[in-house]
Amino acid sequence: MKQKKPIIIELKDVWKTYTMGENEVHALKGINIQIRKGEFVAIMGSSGSGKSTAMNLIGALDIPTRGTIYLDGKNITQYGEDELARVRGRTIGFIFQKFNLIPTLTAKENVTLPLVFQEIDEEKRNKKAEELLEMVELGERMDHIPGELSGGQQQRVAIARALAAEPEIILADEPTGNLDTATGEIVMTFLNKLHKQGTTIIMVTHDEETAKYADRVEILRDGEIVT
């Protein structure tokens, strides 16, 4: 029997509540999720379902109102902001719907940015960025700024940047949301390739076609897991 891989992320009875005047709004209502190393998991839901809140918690961008989040067996809900920032830098690579590239930097400079924060020397970070941009088939465009690239090319730069620090987990927020269908399929093919190489991928999406690339789909509705 095939041995199960270790759990890399676990949310246990996680709530996220916001106070709006005199009212409390429960964005997440006691969700429980286990994600194993090397899995490709899609968290799917419509607008207002709580999937963006879930992504922020999984990505150590926020902490829950109550409940516990474990990353590699460590309870990160007890971490301060500096510790959370270190976790994000070492363990999680982010791919955003709006790309979040710095418009005045070239593709290569955008990819090296996470390595600057980790104080990797210039020669090593430039070599790494060049290798990653070649991998996403943008070797000839690495000296172009984002405004000179198509939407699909910008998203591939974002994928290369997410991989720069060699994270264990890629967290993708609507990675095809701003792309046409054909370009979206190219981006998803890259993510699927990374998954097959052993990277854990967690994708937030509202799109059923995009979710089909995942091993498993968790559906959020009104802040609760319904599957």
Image (cartoon, rainbow, N blue to C red):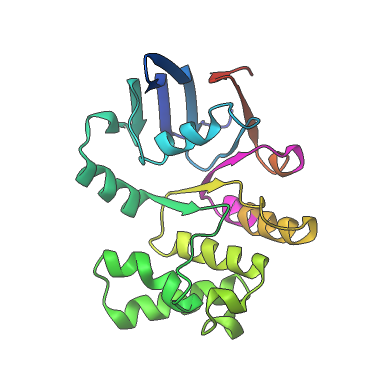
Residue closer to the observer: 98 or 84 = 98
Q: Give the residue at the far front of this rendering.
A: 21
Q: Quadrant of the C terminus?
A: top right
Res. 62 image quadrant: top left
Q: Is residue 22 above or below residue 181?
A: above
Q: Tell me which residue sits at (51%, 50%) in the image.
A: 199
> Residue 122: within the magenta?
no
Q: Is residue 120 above or below residue 227?
A: below
Q: How many marks?
A: 0
- Is residue 172 among the parts visible in the rendering? yes
Residue 132 in the image, given as x and y percentages of width and height: 51, 71
Residue 36 can be seen in this image? no
Residue in the picture at 74% in, 56% down? 185
Query: Residue 203 occupies which quadrant of the picture?
Result: top right
Horizontal side of residue 162 vs 74, given as left or right: right
Residue 78: x percent and y percent?
22, 29
Nearest the viewer among 14 and 41 is 14
Side of 181 relative to 85 (left or right)? right
Q: Which residues are magenta?
A: 193-209
Is residue 133 placed above or below 18 in the rendered structure? below
- Which quadrant would the N terminus be assigned to in this image? top right
Identified at 27% across, 43% down, the residue is 84
Residue found 58% across the figure and 75% down from its top = 147
Residue 226, percent from left and from top? 62, 17
Percent x, y of residue 143: 51, 85
